[in-house]
């Protein structure tokens, strides 16, 4: 199994470019199934999750021409109504194919989506199923598969009792070809939802309100093709900003949208972490003293759960105590045990809350990456630490960060991939 060998006491310098957003690409790829015409996608991140999603699309019969950071897709004919279980079992975002398949074929069969260890047990899809039901679909569970059928999807009114990013996106794309109007309430407001709506509207959909709690979708008969650019990955940009702050480095982050990181940058101001920014760049300056600051993860525009793990590492280097309150996922703080092994002073209050006392020295260790975001957090901790760190199970990191070792090496970091 490949692993990373990392040397500590790292200082980064120079510029790093942010890639296209994983969590936008993973919705736009399945959404291409809603059109029979040719669709070009640019600024596609070259990461494992995107590659799995493209494999799933190809397996369904979609025509695909894929180069590193772009692809051409045409789903004129879809030859299968069943998601390949081998891929779907590895990828939570496989659920995003269900709505478009249902809209195009009137029938879809799929296993419970897998691929993630951060939620309690298997992460639920009850909101998706309820929403398809509200649009007139019939749902059955048999022999380990969901079977969903709908002769013709019809518009509906649906209120999300839990705010869900993929839930919002899934019902939004399912409603695009339904008859009549759909009104979704208490929707998630993440920028990736606006990006998906822009893509669909660019193909002829009629969606209003994406990025607000209420989204209205007027069904249309068909979608056209087009060319679309994936928005910059705000989580990657935020991760690099935190990495620079934790290693006291001067780093320019380019091709990003600082407007999507308002909460992090507002906190940096209070913590004594200097930065300057423009429309599509952000430069972090080395801080002498970082002040601790507590966080509570929240849906956008609140503090993103996907930045919680890197931020927790940053707090081990900040002066004072901070409470990290993870409200979205039950298992996302378990990785802090690894930081404790590296020398951090962290007290777990309960599965959702830890107190970090800083600053502490960290020391390199042999560790295993439990999930994508904890994996990159361990890399940040390894850069801050004294000595060498070995990180195993780096597939988890490759799922979401393109060529991370090469890109960080170009900033002066010592990180080596051992195949
Ligand atoms: N939930 C339900 N029922 C559902 C769906 C969700 O109870 O049917 C609950 C979840 O268990 C969770 C809460 O709703 O407690 C919110 O989860 P959400 O559905 O918003 O998460 P998601 O849509 O599955 C997306 C991102 C995650 C990111 C979250 C929160 C994608 C592919 N994934 O997940 O990204 O953490 O939103 O912002 O867009 C990552 O990139 O590392 C990652 C995990």
Image: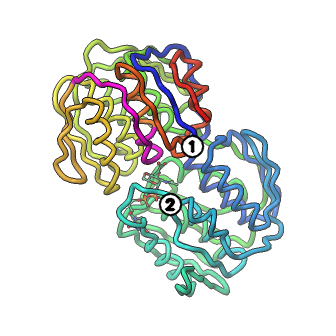
Mark number for residue 322? none
Tell whether position 371 is magenta. Answer: yes
Residue 195 drawn above or below residue 12: below
Q: Quick one: 219 or 12, which is closer to the camera?
A: 12
Residue that mark 1 sits on: 1
Image coordinates of residue 9 in percent, x first then y, are 39, 16
Measuring 51% from the left and 19% from the top, which residue is drawn there?
414
Helix, strand, or loop for circle 2? Answer: helix
Tell whether position 24 is magenta. Answer: no
Q: Left or right: where does residue 201 sit relative to residue 215? A: right
Measuring 47% from the left and 28% from the top, which residue is drawn there?
240
Q: Left or right: where does residue 111 sit relative to residue 339? A: right
**Mark 1 within 8 Å of ligand 1, using the beta carbon:** no
Image coordinates of residue 166 in percent, x first then y, are 50, 60
**Magenta residues, start to end:** 359-375
Q: Left or right: where does residue 250 sit relative to residue 42? A: left
- From this viewpoint, is residue 52 visible? yes
Q: Quick one: 62 or 401, which is closer to the camera?
A: 401
Residue that mark 2 sits on: 166
Q: Quick one: 13 or 21, which is closer to the camera?
A: 13
Q: State which quadrant residue 361 falls in.
A: top left
**Mark 2 within 8 Å of ligand 1, using the beta carbon:** yes
């Amino acid at each position: 199994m490949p692993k990373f060998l990392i040397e500590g006491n790292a200082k980064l310098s120079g510029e790093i470019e942010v890639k296209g957003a994983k969590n936008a690409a993973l919705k736009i790829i399945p959404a291409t199934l809603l059109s029979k015409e040719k669709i070009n996608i640019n600024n596609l991140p070259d990461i494992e999750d995107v590659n799995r999603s493209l494999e799933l699309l190809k397996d369904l019969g979609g025509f695909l021409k894929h180069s590193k950071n772009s692809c051409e897709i045409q789903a004129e004919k879809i030859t299968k109504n069943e998601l390949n279980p081998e891929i779907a079992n590895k990828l939570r975002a496989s659920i995003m194919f269900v709505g478009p398949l249902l809209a195009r074929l009137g029938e879809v069969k799929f296993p419970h989506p897998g691929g993630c260890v951060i939620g309690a047990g298997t992460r639920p899809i009850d909101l998706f199923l309820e929403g398809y039901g509200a649009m007139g679909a019939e749902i059955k569970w048999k022999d380990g598969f969901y079977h969903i059928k709908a002769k013709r999807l019809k518009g509906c009114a649906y209120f999300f009792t839990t705010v869900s990013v993929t839930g919002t996106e899934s019902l939004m794309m399912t409603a695009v070809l339904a008859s009549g109007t759909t009104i979704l309430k208490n929707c998630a407001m993440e920028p990736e939802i606006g990006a998906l709506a822009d893509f669909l509207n660019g193909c002829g959909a009629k969606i209003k309100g994406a990025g607000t709690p209420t989204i209205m979708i007027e069904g249309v008969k068909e979608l056209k093709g087009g060319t679309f650019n994936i928005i910059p990955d705000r989580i990657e940009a935020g991760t690099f900003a935190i990495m620079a702050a934790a290693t006291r480095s001067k780093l320019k982050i380019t091709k990003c949208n600082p407007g999507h990181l308002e909460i992090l940058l507002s906190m940096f101001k209070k913590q004594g972490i200097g930065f300057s920014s423009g429309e599509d760049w952000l430069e972090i300056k080395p801080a002498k003293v970082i002040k601790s600051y507590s966080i509570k993860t929240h849906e956008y525009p609140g503090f993103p759960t996907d930045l919680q793990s890197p931020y927790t590492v940053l707090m081990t280097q900040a002066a004072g105590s901070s409470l990290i309150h993870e409200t979205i996922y039950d298992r996302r703080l378990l990785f802090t045990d690894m930081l404790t092994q590296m020398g951090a002073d962290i007290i777990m209050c309960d599965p959702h809350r830890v107190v970090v006392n800083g600053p502490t020295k960290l020391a390199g260790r042999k560790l295993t990456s439990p999930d994508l975001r904890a994996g990159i957090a361990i890399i940040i901790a390894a850069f801050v630490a004294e000595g060498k760190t070995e990180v195993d199970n780096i597939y988890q990191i490759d799922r979401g960060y393109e060529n991370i070792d090469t890109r960080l090496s170009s900033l002066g970091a010592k990180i080596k991939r051992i195949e």
